Amino acid sequence: MESPGARRNRVRPPRPSRAPDPLRRRRLRMSTALACVAVVGVTAVGAGYARSRAHPDAGGAPSAAAPSAGAPTAAPADDGAVRAESGGTPAAEDGEDGEASVEQEPGVPSAADLTDVLADALDAVDAADGAEVSVAVLDTATGDSAVYGRGAFDTASIVKVDILSALLLRAQDAGRRLTSAERAYATAMIENSDNDSASALWRAIGQADGLDTANRRLGLTGTEGGAGMLWGLTRTTAADQLVLLRQVFGTESALTEASRSYVRELMGRIASGQRWGVSAAADGSDWALKNGWLPRSTTGLWDVNSIGRVAAGGRDVLVAVLSRGSTTQAEGIALVEAAARAAVRSADLASRV
C-alpha cells in the first residue's frame, strides 16, 4: 500500500550542466534544496557524545560500484507490517600584522562550507536514473552539520529506532523499566529487524498517534507515523533522522542515559547480513546502526535507508541516508554506502581548518 505522503521533493536550484552519459548513468542529482542544520550548544554536542575508538581515515573517493561485504545478496521485503523481514592539517603562522593567519590546504573548504562540500561530494556519486537520496551528517567533535535534500521518504525499518525511543519515553513517564516481554521484542526488532516484534511494540506505543506524540518531545518535526499497522510507511526526512540520532547518541536528550545506552547497545549488535549501510564509512567495526529496505508494490523500486554512528578519522560522526527509486536492493545498498562515505569524508575535510 502506498503512503499517502507526497512522493516528490521540492526542486533544487540548478547546478552547472554536464554532458549526457551514454551508459544512462548520471551523477547524483537531488531535486531538493540544500540546507544546513543549525546546531545548538556546540560545546555540549562536541563533548557530550560517547566517544569510541577510531582508526586513521582510509580516504579515497566514494564509489557506488558494490555494496559492503556485510550486505546481503538477497533479502525478504521490509514493508512494515505486511511481510516478515529476515592532505594535512592547515598550519597557523604569525602574520605581519601580529595576528595568526591560516594557510588553508588546497581543496579543503572552510567549516562554513560543509553544506557545499557535501553537495559536491554527493554530486560525484553515481546513481541510476530515477534514484534519489537525502543525507544528513553531524561531526560530533566540531558540532558542524549539513543536510542534502529536504524531501520526505518512507522509513521502512529505520523507524524501529523511533518506535523503541517512544516506548522508552512511555516507560520513563511511568517510572518503570521495560518488561521482559518488551525487552525481548526490542532486541528482536533492532538486532534482527523482526517485523512481528515491531508490530507488537507499535501497538504498545499507540501506533502513529503515539509515535507522533513522542516525536514532538524528541524534536522530530517532519516525521509522520504510518497509517494503521503500516509503521514501515512512516514518512521522515534525513534532517529528522539526524535529530533522532542526536537524541540517542548525545547527552541533551529527552531519553535518560540508561535509555540511550540501551538503544546504542542494540544498534551495535546488528545481525550478520544486516551490517551494511553507514557502516561502510566506519574505520573497521566501530559503528552502531539500523537499516531499512522495502520494495514498493506499485513500482517494484526499492526504498533503502541507513542511520547510525560511525567512528572514522579519529572522530564520531552521525549519519542518516535515505534513498528511493533503486531497481534492486543491492543497487540501493551500494548507493546508500557511497553516500555515507561521501558524507563522512565531507565532515573530515570541513574540519581541517
Image (tube, grey):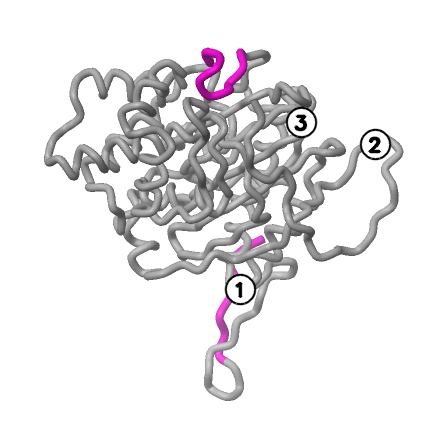
- Residue 77 belongs to the span the image colors magenta: yes
Residue 112 image label: 1
Picture quadrant of residue 6: top right
- According to the picture, the residue beneath numbered tag 3 turns out to be 326
Q: Position of residue 263 (x, y in %)?
A: 29, 31
- According to the picture, the residue beneath numbered tag 2 turns out to be 24
User: What is the quadrant of the N terminus in the image?
Assistant: top right
- Left or right of 50, for residue 2: right
Describe the element under mark 3 as helix, strand or loop. Answer: strand
Residues drawn in magenta: 76-94
Q: Residue furthest left?
A: 175
Describe the element under mark 2 as helix, strand or loop. Answer: loop
Picture quadrant of residue 245: top left
Kindly identify the amino acid type of the residue bearing the numbered disc 3. Ser
Kindly identify the amino acid type of the residue bearing the numbered disc 2. Arg
Residue sitting nearer the eye, 135 or 343: 135
Distance in Å between CA atoms under marks 1 and 3? 32 Å
Residue 232 image label: none
In front: label 2 or label 1: 2
Describe the element under mark 1 as helix, strand or loop. Answer: helix
